[in-house]
Image: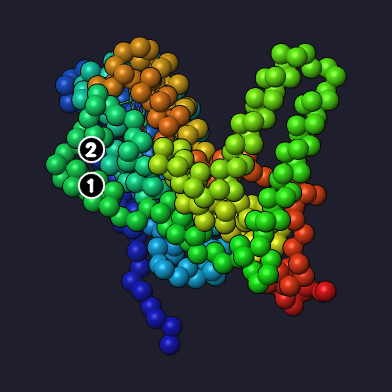
Amino acid sequence: MKKTYPPIYYSDYLHLEKLLTSQSTKSDEYGEHAHDELLFIIVHQAYELWFKLIIHELDSVLNMFREDIVDERNIGIAVARLRRVTAIQKLLIEQLNVLETMTPLDFLEFRDFLIPASGFQSVQFRIIENKLGLNIDNRVKLGNKNYYTMVSDEHQKVLIESEKNVSLFDAVDKWLSRIPFLKIDDFDFWEHYKSAVVQIIENEKQIILNNPSFTDEKREKQLKEFENTKDKFEALLDEDKHNDLMKQGLRRLSYTSTLAALFINLYRDEPILHLPFRFLSYLVNVDELFTTWRYKHALMVHRMIGAKVGTGGSSGHHYLMKTAEEHKVFKDLFDLSTYLIPRSSLPELSDEIKIKLGFNYTYKT
Ligand code: HEM
């Protein structure tokens, strides 16, 4: 027999009574009504609701990747959840436009009532950063203080705890480092990749040396840049160099994981690698959209408060611009494009490997 459930009323289900009475304007409390303060509160509250959903989606992805063995069947679900996160992020970027219908002069009507509150104290925003895996050592400091010293004691505990949990960065690093197809049977992919790269590097050098339109000065400059690219490739093919870069804080992803991520990127067309490729791409998308939000927020802040300090006490838009530049989590995945080589130069995989990377029922030798 079909189970029955008690009827429910729309506004009870959504707790609208609570939700719609949670906008208390300080300007009215002080008897100095400011029309735009309601907009300001609602936009911030809407952000916090979306942050809650982002955390919910990230938690579900983390649960799939935190285990020692990742059930590969979950990668499609993880991709779908990250896609949802990116759809929310696009909305969050757009939402700043609604707030920007308030002019800097209108903001001044109630800004002083807010001191020292600031979005800087958004605990959910920090939890998202920590869940993604923002490197604690790389956080831009605000007046030499740790970010969590700006929130209540209760919130400090939550944030310190959230730093200890496995982040998406850690989980992805571990997952990538276990991917087995870098050396399959007799085929050592990296040996083949190395010779393809040497060939490409040599071609590039010849192009620079033989370009008749270059002046001597320009040629020298181009050759210098070429040497930089060569160095980067060498670091990729040399574990010790990679580990040195890690020590200097210039790389974060382990050597094996970097190679696995590159392999996935290069051979994304192989059926088994396609979903992992999309997963890695969505991580980059999430990072890029947060960076875009940071820039847009910083620009809005500049426009709104000019060169004043923020209500939270920071150097306003200077601090925010710096976080936009330095708070990327999956920078190593962005950097992978340095090592891509054209499809036509990729080492040909043997039929045996192709079978391993394909859906066997469709692959014909
Ligand atoms: C008139 C609108 C806004 C102004 C003038 C403004 C201003 C600022 C300033 C100056 C800071 C730096 C910290 C400080 O000194 O206070 C900051 C940080 C921050 N704001 Fe806003 N903000 C506005 C709207 C928003 C909105 C709608 C959100 C959405 C939740 C938000 C979220 C944040 C976050 C998360 C930070 C910390 C960023 C970081 O440390 O990387 N802000 N804001």
Q: Position of residue 287 (x, y in %)?
A: 49, 41
Which secondary structure lies at badge 1?
helix
Q: Position of residue 182 (x, y in %)?
A: 61, 62
Residue drawn where x is 20% and y is 44% of the image: 155
Q: Position of residue 165 (x, y in %)?
A: 30, 55
Question: Relative to the observer, which residue lies in front, 359 or 225?
Answer: 225
Which residue is most to the left?
153
Please rate how many residues cluster around mark 2, counting C-alpha atoms within 10 Å: few if below 14, some from 14 to 19, many from 20.
some
Compared across the picture, whether 341 is left or right of 125 comes to right
Question: Relative to the observer, which residue lies in front, 160 or 174?
Answer: 174
Q: How is the image coloured?
A: rainbow
- In the rendered view, tell whether residue 162 sits above or below residue 348: above
Q: Earlier in the sequence, mark 1 or mark 2?
A: 2
Please rate how many residues cluster around mark 1, counting C-alpha atoms within 10 Å: few if below 14, some from 14 to 19, many from 20.
few
Compared across the picture, whether 346 is left or right of 151 comes to right
Residue indicated by mark 2? 148
Task: For the residues labelled 1 and 2, say whether their Cβ atoms are less than 8 Å apart.
Answer: yes
Quadrant holding the C terminus: bottom right
Measured in 3D between alpha carbons, the distance from the residue under mark 1 to the one under mark 2, in whole angstroms, is 8 Å
Q: Quadrant of residue 101?
A: top left
Residue drawn where x is 47% and y is 34% of the image: 291
- In the rendered view, tell whether residue 276 sits above or below residue 299: below
* Kind of residue sitting beneath label 2: Tyr
Mark linked to residue 160: 1
Which secondary structure lies at badge 2?
helix
> On the rendering, which quadrant does ligand 1 occupy?
top left
* Kind of residue sitting beneath label 1: Ile
Residue drawn where x is 67% and y is 19% of the image: 221
Which residue is most to the bottom?
1
Q: How many marks do you count on the picture?
A: 2
